[in-house]
Image (cartoon, grey):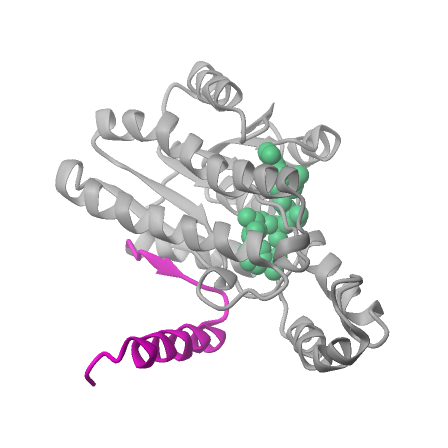
Amino acid sequence: MELEAGQVAVVTGAANGIGAALAAALVARGLRVAIADIDTESLRETAISLGDKVIAVPTDVAEIDQVRTLADRTLDAFGRVDLVVNNAGMGAGGPSWEIDPTTWDRLWAVNVGGVTNGVHVFTPHLIAAGRGHIVNTASLAGLTVGMFGAPYAASKAAVISISESLRGELELIAPGVGVTVVCPGPVDTQMFRGLAEFADSSGDAAPESEAIPPEIRAKLAPMMEAVTEMAKETVPAARAAEVIIAAVESGKLYATTHPEMALAARDRTEAMLESFGTPR
Ligand SMILES: NC(=O)c1ccc[n+]([C@@H]2O[C@H](COP(=O)([O-])OP(=O)(O)OC[C@H]3O[C@@H](n4cnc5c(N)ncnc54)[C@H](O)[C@@H]3O)[C@@H](O)[C@H]2O)c1
């Protein structure tokens, strides 16, 4: 979908990071934008910095009623919706068996429920209009093995799968409505900085956990070093925004900030096919 002045976008998780950078880039293109976030303080500041083409709607994307209110407020203010970016997300990690069930539930509700709520509420509007685009934010972590980050990796794998299904469905039912799933690599935001600081500060380089004996902790050093190395490859949030806009405009299903890192997906698929005994 070509982005044009006067169109309307909804961006969740837009108080900070990639969402805020994307909202700024869309405003610069002349779009009106409804920004939504649970962090009401930063949301207000971001809205003020973006000016009068923006409305701020405090929203917990895990709550369907709040996402419905986001749609109502957007339509009341702007009268249309063209682009929906389900970007809000959170992280959580640790040994899979130690992660508290409430952490699993909350992360799933935000990272997956936030996407499915956005899809459920906004897709009918786009179908009715016969045009538009939905962007769901996954991660390269959803394409690779997510040791000590199972909730996050699994949630992003789910977002990829949901987006692929949605894309196929809309191609049949409403071909004017596109779908993109963005799989960022390391982007310089508070989320990635938190992970990098953790990897940097973990001394003998392993997640703090009694479940990990000292001799195993040493073996995890390369993993933590890999995060530290990845931190050197971060791109600014504005770059992620450019990648998303380019994917929307070219109608691409998959987009990433780090194509070279996506090679890990091939390694994983090859290992899987080998294990299945799939003929080559
Ligand atoms: N930064 C990276 O390296 C990276 C890499 C891959 C994927 N991502 C994904 O990109 C997206 C944006 O993350 P970011 O890096 O800009 O991080 P960020 O922490 O700067 O921004 C995430 C935003 O989501 C908001 N949020 C969290 N829970 C919410 C909820 N329940 N309802 C509404 N808003 C909520 C936060 O308040 C925050 O403003 C996330 O989905 C993240 O998983 C980021």
| Residue ID at (29%, 30%) | 126
What residue appears at the point 39 percent right and 57 percent down from the top-left corner? 246
Span colored in magenta? 251-280
**x then y, percent, for residue 125:** 30, 25
Looking at the image, residue 184 sits to the left or right of residue 251; the answer is right
Q: Is residue 193 visible?
A: yes
Residue 1 left/right relative to 113? left
- Looking at the image, which residue is at 37% across and 34% down? 119
| Residue 279 in the image: above or below residue 156 | below
Q: Position of residue 78 (x, y in %)?
A: 43, 21
* Residue 217 falls inside the magenta stretch: no
Q: Nearer the viewer, residue 130 or 181?
A: 181
Work out whether 263 lies above or below 99.
below
Q: Which sits in the foreground, 146 or 53?
A: 146
**Where's residue 53, x and y in %?**
54, 29
**Residue at the left extreme of this rendering:** 172
- Count the numbered circles shown: 0
Q: Can residue 14 be spotted in the picture?
A: no
255 or 274, nearer to the observer: 274
Q: Quadrant of the C terminus?
A: bottom left
Is 260 within the magenta? yes
Looking at the image, which residue is at 40% across and 45% down?
Answer: 135
State which quadrant residue 104 falls in. Answer: top right
The answer to whether residue 95 is left or right of residue 131 is right
Q: Position of residue 141 (x, y in %)?
A: 52, 62
Q: Where, by quadrant of the figure, is residue 129 drawn?
A: top left
Which quadrant would residue 35 be assigned to in this image? top right
Q: What is the chief secondary structure element of the magenta stretch?
A: helix
Q: Is residue 248 above or below residue 175?
A: below
